[in-house]
Amino acid sequence: MTKSRIIIIIFLVVAIGAFFIFDLGQYLTLDYFKSQQQAIEGYRQNHPLATALGFFIVYVAVTGLSLPGAALMTLVAGAIFGLGWGTLIVSFASTIGATLAFLVSRLLLKDLVQRRFGDKLKTANRGIEKDGAFYLFTLRLVPAFPFFVINLVMGLTPIRTWTFYWVSQVGMLAGTLVYVNAGTQLAQLQSLSGILSLELIISFTLLGVFPLLAKKAVEIFKARRVLKHYPKPKHFDRDLVVIGAGSGGLVSAYIGAAVKARVSLIEKHRMGGDCLNTGCVPSKALIRSAKFLSHARRAREFGFDSVAVDFDFARIMERVQRVIREIEPHDSVERYTKLGVDCIQGEAQITSPYTVNVNGHTLTTRSIVVATGGRPAVPSIPGIEDIGYLTSNTLWELRTLPGRLLVLGGGPIGCELAQCFARFGSRVIQLNRGQRLLNKEDPEFSSMVMQRFEREGIELRMNHSPKAFHVDGGRKTLVAEHDGREVEIEFDALLLAVGRQANSRGFGLEALGVPLRKDGTIEINDYLQTIYPNIYAVGDVAGPYQFTHTAAHQAWYAAVNGLFGSFKKFRADYSVIPWATFTDPEIARVGLNEQEAKAKSIPYEVTTYPIDDLDRAIADEEAHGLVKVLTVPGKDRILGVTIAGEHAGDLISEFVAAMRHGFGLNKILSTIHIYPTLAEANKYVAGNWKRAHAPKRVLAWLGRYHCWRRGGKP
C-alpha cells in the first residue's frame, strides 16, 4: 500500500470517527436548525459571504465523507439563502463533495475490486464505458437512489472523473431545486397552521412525486433517443406483431388476442416451434417407448420369468410422429385463428421498430415480440462437416437404429437421447469434456445417472476433448485428447448435443443495431425490452433459461408490457424456475443446489430423504433416488430442492409452489399426502428437517413431566 493511500485512510478514519465520537450529527438535525434559525439568519445578514463559504465547506465535507445530513443541509440552504443562491451553493458543493468521495473510492478500492471480481464485472465495465454518462445521469435524476452509494460505486468503474463531475452537476440540479424550494417553505413555518400552507403542500408533493416524474422523463428521453431516426406511423395495422410460433410466440399472441388487441403471428416453418416438432414432445415420446422396453428387460424384478418384446425401430419413430400429430392441433393455425390471432406463414424482416415486412407486405405495429427460438450448436471441429452428423433437430428423420452411436455432450439433451438409444440396442459412446455428466447438478445426482448409464451399457468417456473427425472408406472415427494423449473412437453415427445457439440474426436486428450478448442471445432489460422500448424478446433467443415453460412465462410479461407498458410495466420474475432432465432416474430441480450455494457464499442447511425407504417406491420396484432440500440455517424457508427418482419432475411441483408462495417445510409436513404415493417423499424430507430442529431442552422437560405424571421420579 502506498504512503498516500495510508495518509488518506488515516484522515478518513479520524474525520469519520470524530463525527460520531463527538456526536457532531446533532448539529445536522431539523430540531437544531429550528432552534438556531434566528441566530443563523442574523449572522447571514451581517456576514453573507462568510456564511455562504462556511456552509459550502461543511456541505463539501459531509458529502465528501459520505456522512448523513446532506438532504437536511439542502433544505437548510433554501431556508437560509433562498431558492436562487441556495440552489447555486448546493449544486457546486454537492458535486465537489461527490467527486471527492468518488476519487477516494477509486484510489482505495477500484484496483482491489477489479482484480477480485474483474471477470464478473466485464459486462458492467463495458456498459459504463459505452453509456456511463447516461447511466449516471439516470441515477442522479432519481433521488430514490442514495447519492453517497452512487459516488462510491461509480469510483469502482472505468467512468472518467470529468464525466462523473459534469454529469453529476447537471443530473442533480433538478433534485436540488426541488429540495431547496421545499427548504424555502420550511423557513417560513412559524406555527402549526403553516403546515397547511399551499406552498408547503406543493413543495412536499414535489418531493414525493419527483422520483416518479424523473424516472418517467428518463424513460421518455431514452426511448426518443433510439427511436428518433425512425418515423412513427400515424396509424398502425397491428397492436402486436409476434415473430416465431414456438412456446413464447404462441403465448404472446394468445395473450394479445385475449385482451382484444390486433395481433399477427409470423412463422416461417411449423407452428409449435422446436418444442412440438423437434424438442420436448418427440423426445418424451421416444423416452416413453425406451422406458417400456427397459421395464420388459426387468421382468424378473416384477415377478415374471421373462418378457419378450419385438420391435421395429422405424415403427417407434413413426409413433413419435403420431404423437406430434395428435398434439399439433393445440398449436395449429386453425386454433389460433379462432382465438383471434392473424397467423401468417412467411419469413419476417424487421425494417424499423414500427414495421415488419413479410411476404412482400409491410405491417405497421406498436410493439414487436421476437420469439425466434434457437438451434443446436455445431462445434468447430476439423472434419465434422464430412461426417453427416445428427442433432436434436434432424434426429427424428432416422428410421434405422445406429449400430454405434457417438454422443457429444453431457448435458440434459445428450443424456436423455443417449439413454434412449442404448435401451433400443445401439452401442452408445457418450463423450464429454468435463469429468461428469450433468455438471450443473450436485455430484451425487450426476453420479446416480452415470452409474445407471454404465449398468445399461453406455460407454462413458469423460475428460475427452474432440480434436478431429476422419472418414476413411466408410469408417468414421473421432480423434480425442484424454489425459494428454490422443485416443481414436470408431462410430457409425454422430449425435451433437453440445448446447444451443439463439436464432438472433437474419431478420433485421443487425440493421437496427440491437446488441447481442456473448452467447448470441438478444440483450434485454428486466422488462424484456431491447434497446428499442417497443421491441421485446422471449424464449431461447433471449435467455437466460432455455426451457419451454420459461419462454411461456416470459411471454406474459412481453405481451402485457408491449400492450400496456405506457401505463404499467412488469419486471420478469425468475425467482422460482424449475426444470427437469428426463433420464432414468429423472433429475428435477428448483432454486439453489449445494454447489451453487457454495459458489455464491450463501449460508444453508441440507436435509435429505433417500427414496429407497419409501413404501410406494419399493412396491413399484423403483426404490432409488434422493430428495435434497437446502434451507436457511435454523429456518424452514426453502432455498432450493433437487430430486432424483421416478417422476421427479412431478414431485418437484410441491416445492415450486412452496418457494413461489412463501411457505416452508413445516407447512409441507402438516399437509396430508395420500398413502402410498411417491409424493410422500416430500413430507418425509420435511419430517427429517423437523426432527433435526426439535427443541431438545423442551423435550427433556416433557419427558420429566410425563414421568412425574406416571408417579415416578424424574
Image (cartoon, helix red, strand yellow):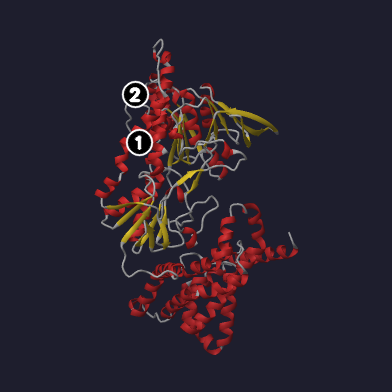
Which of pointers 2 and 1 indicates the residue nearer the eye?
1
Give the side of residue 606 with respect to residue 712, left or right.
right
In this view of the protein, can residue 36 be seen by the observer? no
> Reading the chain from its start, which is encountered first: label 2 or label 1?
1
Distance from label 2 to label 1 (Cα)? 34 Å
In this view of the protein, can residue 332 be seen by the observer? yes
Disc 1 marks a residue whose amino acid type is: Ile
Q: Which mark is residue 676?
A: 2
Give the side of residue 440 with respect to residue 206, left or right.
right
- Furthest toward the right, the residue is 3
Q: Nearer the viewer, residue 96 or 411?
A: 411
Which residue shows up at 35% across the image and 26% down it? 677
Q: Nearer the viewer, residue 364 or 620?
A: 364
Within 10 Å of the Cα at label 1, are there few (<14), some (14-19), or many (20+) other Cα atoms? some
**Percent coordinates x, y for residue 529 in the rendering:** 43, 58
SS for callout 1:
helix
Disc 2 marks a residue whose amino acid type is: Pro
Within 10 Å of the Cα at label 2, are there few (<14), some (14-19), or many (20+) other Cα atoms? few
**Percent coordinates x, y for residue 346 in the rendering:** 37, 52
Q: From the image, which quarter does the C terminus lie in?
A: top left
SS for callout 2:
loop
Give the side of residue 343 with respect to residue 664, left or right.
left
Q: From the image, which quarter does the N terminus lie in?
A: bottom right
Image quadrant where residue 184 sits: bottom left
**Where 344 falls versus 413 (above or below)?**
below
The residue pinned by badge 1 equals 324
Image quadrant where residue 285 sits: top left
- Furthest toward the top, the residue is 305
- Furthest toward the bottom, the residue is 46
